[in-house]
Amino acid sequence: MNNKFFPSNFLFILIMILGTMFSLSSSHWLTMWMGLELNLMGFLPLMNIKGKMLEAEASMKYFIIQSMSSSVLIFTSTMIYSYNMSWYSMLNNNMMSSLILLSLILKLGGAPMHFWLPSITSHMPWSILFILLTWQKLAPLFMLSLMNSNMMVIMMISIMSTLMGSVMALNQTNLQLIITYSSISHLGWMMTMILFNSSLTLFYFINYIIISIPLMHLISSELGNHLFMLTQKTNMNNMIIISLILSLAGLPPLLGFMSKLIILISLIKMKLFLFTVMMLLGTLISLYFYLNISLMLMIKSYTMFKIPKNIKTYKSLISLNMLSSFIIYPMITMFIN
C-alpha cells in the first residue's frame, strides 16, 4: 500500500470490514443491503491505491456492476415487502427469489455473469486482488445461503461456474487472470452446498483463503504477473509454491483435495451423481493449467532446494496445506457422520 496515505487506507479497510460484518450479523434484507453498500464504499478507494488510470477504470467498472446488482436487490426486497408486509419473510415467490439470486450471482462474479471480473482484476495489485476474490465474496455467499428455493438454478450456476472458470483459464498468460478464473471455478464448488449445508461452504471458503494467502504473496513478491516469468531465476523455494498450486488444483493429499472431498462425499450421499461428474469434469480441466504452471516452475531445478528468507511468515499455513490428510480428514469424518 502507498505509505503516504496509510491512515486513510486503514480507515477504508475498517469501513469495508464493518460493512461485511453488518451484512453477516443481520437477518433483515434492508440492513444486509446497507452493509453491502458500506462495504462497496470502503473497497472502492482501496482499488485506487497507486493512482493509475487503469486502476481508476477498473474501480469505475466495479462500482457500476455492484450498483446495478444492489439496485436489483433493493428493488426486489421492496417488492417482497409490498407483497408480504415484512422484511423478514422467507422468499416464497419464485420470480422475486430468482431476481435476488441473479443480483447476488452478479455481485459474486459467478458464471454466466462473470464477464466483468477478469477485465477488472488484470489491472489490480495482488493485495487488492486477494481481498476481491476472498473477503468481498463473504457477505453475498451468506445472503445466498438464506435462499430457500431455486435449487436447480443454483446447481446449474455451480456447474457453469466450474466449467467456465476452468475453460477460460486455459489460454491465459497473465497470472492474475488465471487466479481470477480459478476463483470463479472454486466459487462453483462453494455454491454446490450452499442450500444443503452452508457450514461445508464456509469450510471450503476458509481452506481457499489458507491456500491463497501464501500463494498470492509469493507470486507477487517473487514471480511477477506473467507465465513466462515463472522460468526466470529467483531465490524462492519452488517446491513450496508448487505444493500450493497443486493444492489449489485439488490433488491429494493436499488441503485443496480435502475441501473437494468433503463436498463430493455429501453430493454422492444425496445421490446427485450427474452433478458430481460435471463438477469433477470442471476440476480436471483446471488441473491441466495448474500442472502447466507447476511444470514451468519445476524447470528451474537448480533453485528448487534453496531456503528462502521470506517464507517464515507462512510456515504454519504451508504446514497445514502439506499435512492436511492427517489434520483435516478426522474433521471431515465428523462433518459427514
Image: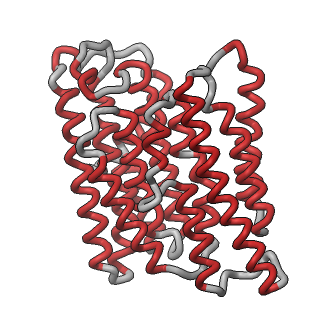
Where in the figure is residue 176, as x and y percent of width and height?
40, 34
Q: Residue at x 43, y 41 (%)?
A: 211
Picture colour scheme: secondary structure
Taking depth in this image into account, of 252 and 221 the one nearest to the observer is 221
Where in the figure is residue 71, as x and y percent of width and height?
69, 61
Instruction: Quadrant for the C terminus, please.
Output: bottom left
Residue 252 visible in the snapshot: no
Where in the figure is residue 218, as x and y percent of width and height?
41, 25
Instruction: Quadrant for the N terminus, please.
Output: top right
Residue 279 placement, left or right of 94: left
Residue 74 visible in the snapshot: yes
In the rendered image, which quarter is residue 275 located in? Answer: bottom left
Where in the figure is residue 306, as x and y percent of width and height?
27, 15
Residue 250 placement, left or right of 44: left
Instruction: Please give the count of numbered marks on the rendered protein.
Output: 0
Looking at the picture, does residue 31 appear above or below residue 196?
A: above
Taking depth in this image into account, of 45 and 198 the one nearest to the observer is 45
Q: Residue at x 59, y 51 (%)?
A: 65
Looking at the picture, does residue 85 appear above or below residue 32?
A: below
In the rendered image, which quarter is residue 18 located in? Answer: top right
Looking at the picture, does residue 42 appear above or below residue 259?
A: above
**Residue positioned most to the right:** 85
Q: Residue at x 23, y 42 (%)?
A: 171
Q: Residue at x 57, y 70 (%)?
A: 101
In the rendered image, which quarter is residue 57 located in? Answer: top right
Residue 229 placement, left or right of 158: left
Taking depth in this image into account, of 95 and 316 the one nearest to the observer is 95
